Image (spheres, coloured by chain):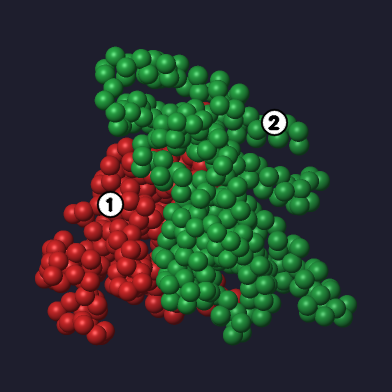
Amino acid sequence: MKAYLQRRILFSLIALAGVTVVVSAMLHISGDPVAVMLQSGIASQAEREALRHELGFDKPFILQYVDFVRGAIRGDLGLSLRFRQPALTIVRERLPATLQLAAAAMAFALVVAVPVGILSAARPRSLLDYAGRLLTLFGQSIPLFWLGIMLVMVFAVRLRWLPSAGKLDATSLVLPAVTLGLYPMARIARTLRASMFEVLPHEYCLTARSKGLSERLVVIRHALPNALLPVVTVIGLQFGALLGGAVVTETIFAWPGLGWLSVQAVQARDFPLVRAIVAVVSMLFILINLLTDLLYAYLNPRIRLG
Amino acid sequence: MSSVAQSGTASAVREKVAAGRRSTGLRLIVRSLARDRAASLGLALVVAWLAMGLVGPFVLPGDPNGQELADALRPPAWLEGGVREQPLGTDHLGRDMLVRIVYGARTSMVIGVSAVVLAATAGALAALFAAEWGGGVDEVLMRVADIQLSVPFILLAITVLALLGGSMGSMVLVLVLAGWVIYARVLRSELLYLREVEFVQGARALGASRLRVIFRHLLPNAAGLVVVVATLELANVIILEAALSFLGVGIGPPEVSWGTMLADGRDYLTTEWWLATLPGVAITVTILGVNLVGDWARDVLDPRTARSE
């Protein structure tokens, strides 16, 4: 187990390095960063050269990257060109909002997906089953950005029940969370349903039934724990995917998180900030994947004891 | 949506696939499709989308970029203020919505199909190299794939597109970069499995060259899997393209993209709702069709499902 952990961590660092190299390369070829910083203002060529030298932008790519890594270890992820502040500070300000959104979306997804998946599998071909399958089919097919816009139109503009944008109060979280969480809900429900189908015909369920246990007990106490295993993997994957979906969701709802920030940063050509965001989000992503794998290894007795 | 009681024809097809037969009986496949109502609906939707994209621009009169500001924000024909000449209304620049939706279908079709075909080819080649030559090549390839998967791709995508500029070509490139990984991974596992199956080992024992084994035995049997992954990925590709265009880094004028149309329509949600609703319906219906076909494909063509029965 320990060797596995070490390998995974080492590999995660390599992945992080790979990703930051790519973004750094893009920063390097994207043009003159000093030009972005000095958009307004009539700086002379000499002043631009001086600023470039001071910020280290005239060094060769490798050295710039080494500087970045050295800084990163110390907690300095570079300077945002647009905000003139340390990129890490800006990222830290916006990270909680994104995490909050992701957590709410996942909570919504699970609260809906688990009952839908179980009921669908426990009563196949019933009205409940078809309704559930329809819901998950649409949940998987509706594009995130359209769903968000439609929800805003119905609930914010027409009905005026919920706010249409921004992070003002608790109700602001509802629409973005539902938008972001619908697709994971659909995937989790489908996986759970399929997994339950695999599990329900097994002998131990038959045994439980013949012991006289109610169907509900059989499903919840015996079938469900075993069916949850592949679902755990899907949940982990979806949590990672949520970070990606947050980019679009936050943009639609003007949610002050990392996703929206990244779009703004790219549009403003503020590549150091983009690099910082990518680094932080990748780290989160890698962490989530690692935790998911560990959880799966722990839950699956075959891996744990084998 | 896999049905609990499998239809007779579906399992017959699966048996043939699992047995490694090269021709699974096209007729059996078609019959299985016709019997599955959901899949038939899906196929109808996909065909409609393809038809719109291929034929629509030639059949419809009208310029998707023809601005007519006097005509702007006209509602669809069935609402008050709408006219029959513009059945779906016009947008904020007076452009005909129906024409734009049809051209948008063409964009999503061209980009979607090219991205899927190219990504599948790239992924399949990578998987072949990894499975056949093993060792270092395999390790490197899989590490690259893992690295790429360790970041939410949309972040890289918007960065790359901002650099390259949003054109059809750069969009396809980004989508191929996003997509090749899953083909490579899935095919690699399947190829590694297939290599140990009897008929392949038999062929090798009989002296078949490596190339012959690959083309005559491995690839045809992996083809079903590629089709399954490709259909599911087509949906992802269409959504990703629309999302990137929506964010403003993707397709821009003079090309028409449903995603860009959605972005334009956002400002008019309060009164001119059709600007944002209609393209969204188009995307959703297309994705629905692709997903339905993909589900059926997975039930019938995926050798892994067949094996676990």
Residue that protrudes farthest toward the right in the picture = A211
Q: Which chain is green?
A: A
The residue carrying mark 1 is B251
- Per the image, label 2 sits on a secondary structure element best described as helix
Residue drawn at x 23%, y 68% is B91
One can see residue A184 in this view: no
The residue nearer to you, when weighing B141 against B195, is B141
What mark, if any, has residue B145 been given in the picture?
A: none
Please state if B69 lies on the left or on the right of B123 as rendered.
left
The residue sitting at 49% across, 27% down in the picture is A78
Q: Vertical placement of A9 versus A155: above or below?
A: above
Q: Is residue A126 visible?
A: yes
Spatial distance from mark 2 to mark 1, Cα to Cα? 43 Å
* Residue A116 sits in quarter: bottom right
How many numbered badges does the structure rendering display? 2
Q: Image point 26% across, 84% down: which residue? A: B79
Residue assigned mark 2: A6
Residue B279 x/y as whole percent: 32, 68
Q: Quadrant of the N terminus of chain A?
A: top right
The x and y percentages for residue A60 are 39, 16
User: In the rendered structure, which amino acid carries the disc numbered 1?
Assistant: Ile
Picture quadrant of residue A16: top right
Q: Which chain is red?
A: B
Residue type at the position of mark 2? Gln
Q: What element does badge 1 sit on?
A: loop
The residue carrying pointer 1 sits among few (fewer than 14), some (14 to 19) or many (20 or more) residues within 10 Å by Cα, namely: many
Q: What percent of the width, then of the height, locates residue B261?
A: 29, 62
Q: Are marks 2 and 1 on the same chain?
A: no
Camera-nearest residue between B291 and B126? B291
Residue at the location (41% across, 46% down)?
A263
Closer-to-camera residue (B256/B199): B256
